[in-house]
Amino acid sequence: MSNVKSILLVGVGGQGTILASKILSDGLMEAGYDVKMSEIHGMSQRGGNVSTQVRFGDKVFSPIIGKGEADLIVAFEKMEALRWIEYLKPGGRIVINDAEIPSVPIQMGVASYPEGIAEELAKKATTYVFKATDLAEELGNPKSMNMILLGALVKAIDLPQIDWEEIIKRNIKPAFVDINLKAFQVGQAQVSD
């Protein structure tokens, strides 16, 4: 039986999805795991969707997560969780930033934002939903939202043995380290055991 774990991080351009994935991958490699990461930018610079796939274990042959294979989905925007739910394996978990970023069709008025996303997903998997964007604003830096979600991810997939503080310090500009460390801790507090 494979010990490989698969994490899918999904969001919208500009939310820091790729940075969170790189920090995650860096920490996993530091801990001795074989790690493969794949990223898809789409039209990310124009607010389009972004997804990264991180797989880790003793030996990982491919970075690609197939449908029904993700142990954890981390959605930086809640409609992205809905869009990617078919990739979650039975018994998997979902971390959702309870934030809405309307897509272009919604902004144009040709579609409407779906209602009850978090409630629907909670019927399918263990789901942690919280307002990461609001929590980041309360900390004083809205861009730290990605570190809040990374903290929640680490707690949800049970990776406390890695020195995340050191990994964050290594990947974040010195002026922003303290706020990002606080954000990481706030994110961990959002996930119950």
Image: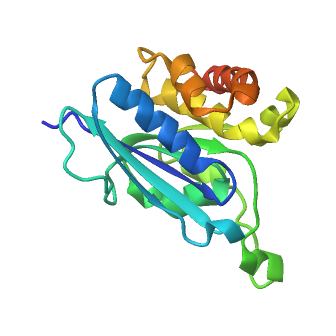
Is 140 positioned to the left or the right of 34 in the image?
Answer: right
Q: Nearer the viewer, residue 120 or 184?
A: 184
Residue 10 visible from this viewpoint: yes
Indicate the position of residue 91 as horizontal and vertical percent values: 37, 39
Q: What's the residue at 60%, 65% (across, down)?
A: 49
Q: Is residue 38 above or below residue 122?
A: below
**Considering depth in this image, is 110 or 188 the residue closer to the camera?**
188
Q: Is residue 134 left or right of residue 53?
A: right
Give whichever of 159, 110 is nearer the camera: 159
Indicate whether 41 appears above or below 145: below
The N terminus lies in quadrant: top left
Farthest residue, direction front: 174
Tell me which corner region of the image, top left, top right, bottom left or bottom right, holds residue 59. Answer: top left
Question: Percent position (x, y) of residue 76?
Answer: 64, 49
Q: How are the residues colored?
A: rainbow
Residue 151: horizontal and vertical position, in percent? 59, 28
Depicted 114 relative to depicted 105: above or below: above
> Which residue extends farthest left?
1
Residue at the spot 61% in from the left edge and 22% down from the top edge: 188
Residue at (74, 68) in percent of width and height: 113
Left or right: 137, with 66 as reference point: right
Q: Is residue 157 above or below residue 98?
A: above
Percent x, y for residue 130?
A: 71, 37
